Image (tube, helix red, strand yellow):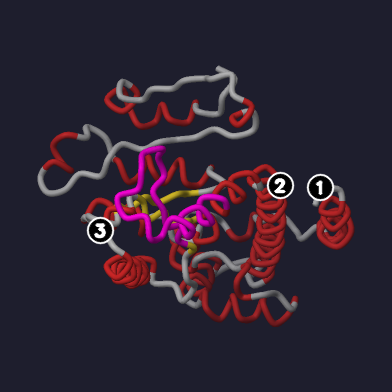
Amino acid sequence: PALPYHGLQQFGVSFLNKLEGAQLPSPVLRNISIVDTPGILSGEKQRMQRGYDFTTVCGWFAERADLILLLFDAHKLDISDEFRTVIESLKGQDDKIRCVLNKADQVDRQKLMRVYGALMWAMGKVTKTPEVLRVYTGSFWDQPLLHSENAKLFELEEKELLADLKNLPRNSAVRKINEIVKRARKCKVHAYIMSYLRSQMPSMTGKQKKQEQLIKDMPSVFRAVMKKYSLAAGDFPEMEKFRSKLGELNFSKFPKLNEKLIAKLDEMLTRDIPHLMDTLPT
């Protein structure tokens, strides 16, 4: 009951019946929870055997995770349609994603180079981002290596992966602070947009027509607000989604802009957040 998984109830009984959890008295797990997703299916199995929306569930966990490990087998590199859909649903969380090219001892050095290149190319096609994802290559179990020529490389890669995991608590704190900053900046932009829309409404007649015009001309509204308050374009909401929500609201009833609250928000961003960052362990 103390764990943050109550939100999983929305995915229904079929999913909850398949969900299993375990708590172990391990010092490694003191500050870390590990979520292991089921294997990726292909073909008709995807639709018939799950009984729940696998991609949506993965997205729910991914939003709350501090690190996402995508596992691939070096001797059987394949990105199925279901796996591709899951990876695409992780858009915007690229900084959390690491790839693990496992069972790399099953192939020789030359083939491993080709597999590594193929993985990078395939992931670039799916993620559609210019940034190169970090890939850890190795054989992550305690059995003897089939091809030992890359043993030193595997050892170094394993150490770096463990260091990545060890830094999770601090990185998690940094990410949460960054999320606060992102939400605060978006909140500020939202307040300015609401204030601008309210100021454009007529005091007497023609309110409905003017509101429809403002919604239609939302790109101009964004540009006007951005220029007036010197705001960053990246802090603005997704336009079509934002526009679809506005039709349900009455611009004339939007509250006036509270300059004092905006000042407090700016103070938090310029003074409190840097102070909070300084308190984190290095």
Quick one: quadrant of the N terminus?
A: top right
- Position above or below: 202 against 44: below
> The residue under label 2 is which amino acid type?
Arg
Report the residue marked by disc 2: 170
The answer to whether the residues at label 2 and label 1 have Cβ atoms under 8 Å apart is: yes
- Position above or below: 47 against 108: above
The answer to which of 178 and 115 lies nearer the viewer is 115
Horizontal and vertical percent for residue 87? Answer: 36, 56
Range covered by the magenta-colored residues: 135-159
Is residue 85 shown to the viewer in this render?
Answer: no
- Point 69% across, 56% down: residue: 178
Q: Which is more foreground, mark 1 or mark 3?
A: 3
- Farthest left residue in view: 44
Q: Quadrant of residue 19?
A: top left
Q: Secondary structure at mark 2?
A: helix
> Where residue 281 is drawn, which disc sits there?
1
Decide whether residue 98 is among the magenta residues: no
